[in-house]
Image: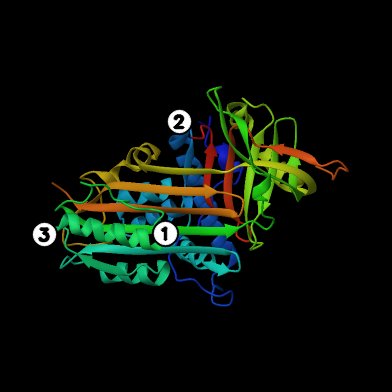
Amino acid sequence: MLTDRRTLLKLALFGLACGGSPVRTAGERQTKLSDDVLQAAAETSNLFAADLQKLLGTEGGNLFFSPASISAALAMTAAGAEGETRKEMFSVLHASGESDAWLRGMGGLSRLLNATGEGYTLQMANRLWGQNGFQFRADYLLRMEEQFAAPLGQVDFVGAPEPSREAINAWVAEQTRDRIKDLLPAGSITGLTRLVLTNAIYFKADWRDEFNKKLTQEQPFRCADGKQVTLPLMNLEKSFPYAEDELAQVLELPYKSGGLSMVVILPKDKGGLSELEQQLTNERLSGWMKQLEPQSTMVFFPKFKLETQFSLAAALKKLGMPRAFDSRAEFGGMSTEAPLNISDVVHKAFVEVDEQGTEAAAATGVIMATRAAPIQREPKVFRADHPFLFLIRHRESGAVLFAGRLSQPK
C-alpha cells in the first residue's frame, strides 16, 4: 500500500498508547517520568508502526489497526527477552538507547493515555495469562505489574486449553465493551502454551461538533478499484483545522474532549490515494500539520464501520525478529523453567463512525509456547467520497491510538 515506511511515519499516523491502568483523573495521570523519556518512547513506537503499516497495507483494500495496542504487547514481551532475541526485538521496535528507560517510558505513556470525561472514554488494559504452576521470574512479573499494570492471571493451558482460551477472550471482550470478541481463534492455544500477553484498548468519543442526522444522505463513493457504491455521507459546515496543497486536503475533526481528534487526509484526485501515498514527504506532511488553521469548511464525511483480524507473525519476522518465533528464542527473562518462544501474535480491531462520534477498539495477544492554508471567506468543501486515510490521535502526547484507510466501503 505504501511505497516506503516513511509515509505514515512522517504523517504521524502512528504513536504509542501502551499500558493498562484503570481510568484515572487528571491529577492521577501525572507521571514522574520526564517529557524526554515519554517522547522518546512515542517516537520509537512511531517508527515501528510505520514499518508495520507498510507490510499490513500491501494487500490493498481497507485497513484498520491499533499501533498502540501492538506496541504495548510487544514491549511487554521484549522486556523478558535476552541475548540476540532481545537485540532483534528492540531493533524492530526501534528501542535504541537504554532499554530500561525505554520500557519505563512505554509504561508512562500508558498512564498518560488513560482518561475519561464528558463525552469521551479512553481505556487500555494489559494482562498476563500464565500456566498454573509454571515458574515465572519474580522480577519480570514485578516489572509488568509496576510499569504496565499487567497482573498475572493463572490458567491451565496444559489440561484445559480451550477453557483457557475462552477465559482470555472473555476478558478482552469485557475490556472492549464486547467490540472485540474471539481475539484468540480456535486452535491458537494448545497444551504447549505457557504464557499469553494481552493488551486491549477501547475508545469512544463524541464529536465536538456533531453532525445533524437529518442532513445525512445516501451519496456515491468512488472505491479504489474504480467502482462506485452508495453510502451515507454526513454533512456539517463549521470552522475546523484545515490545510491543503495541490495533492491533498487535510482536515482535523476534534472530539468533545479537546485532547483527542481524527485527522483525515483526502487526495484531491478521486483515484489518487496511491499517488498520495507515494508522494508524501516529511516536508509536505510537516507543512500540513503546521498549516492547520481554523477554516470555515463544508464537510461531507461517510458513516462507516470496519473490522479487521490478522496474525502478525509473518510481518514481524520480515521486519527482523525471526529468532523470537523459533527454537533459538531466548526468553530467560520471563522464566528459566523451560525455553519459550512466540508461537503467534494476533490482533483484532473495530471502528465505527457516525453523526455522534467514533467508537473504536482493538486487542493484541502474544502467545508464548515451549518448544516441541490562510482563512478564506468562502467555506472550503471537504467531500470524502473517495478513498482516504484517517487516524485517531491524542493531541497532548502526539500518540496515535488507531490508524486506517477506507478504500472499499461495504
Relative side of 356 to 237, left or right: left
Label number found at residue 58 = 2
In the image, 33 versus 363, the foreground residue is 363
Instruction: Indicate the secondary structure of the residue bearing disc 1.
Output: loop
| Above or below, comparing residue 79 to residue 295 in the picture | below
Instruction: Indicate the secondary structure of the residue bearing disc 2.
Output: helix
User: Going from the N terminus, do you reach mark 1 or mark 3 first?
Assistant: 3
Could you say which quadrant of the image residue 36 lies in? bottom right
User: Going from the N terminus, do you reach mark 2 or mark 1 first?
Assistant: 2
User: Going from the N terminus, do you reach mark 3 or mark 2 first?
Assistant: 2
Give the tally of numbered discs: 3
> Percent position (x, y) of residue 244?
74, 38
The three-letter code of the residue at mark 1 reads: Thr
The three-letter code of the residue at mark 3 reads: Gly
Name of the residue lying farthest toward the front: 214
| Rendered residue at 40%/58% (across/down) | 200
In the image, 289 versus 257, the foreground residue is 257
State whether residue 79 appears in this view. Answer: no
Name of the residue lying farthest toward the left: 159
Could you say which quadrant of the image residue 148 lies in? bottom left
The colour style of the image is rainbow
Label number found at residue 221 = none
The residue under label 1 is 176
> Percent position (x, y) of residue 60?
47, 30
Q: Residues within 10 Å of mark 3 (few under 14, many from 20)?
A: few
The three-letter code of the residue at mark 2 reads: Thr
Label number found at residue 159 = 3
State whether residue 257 appears in this view. Answer: yes
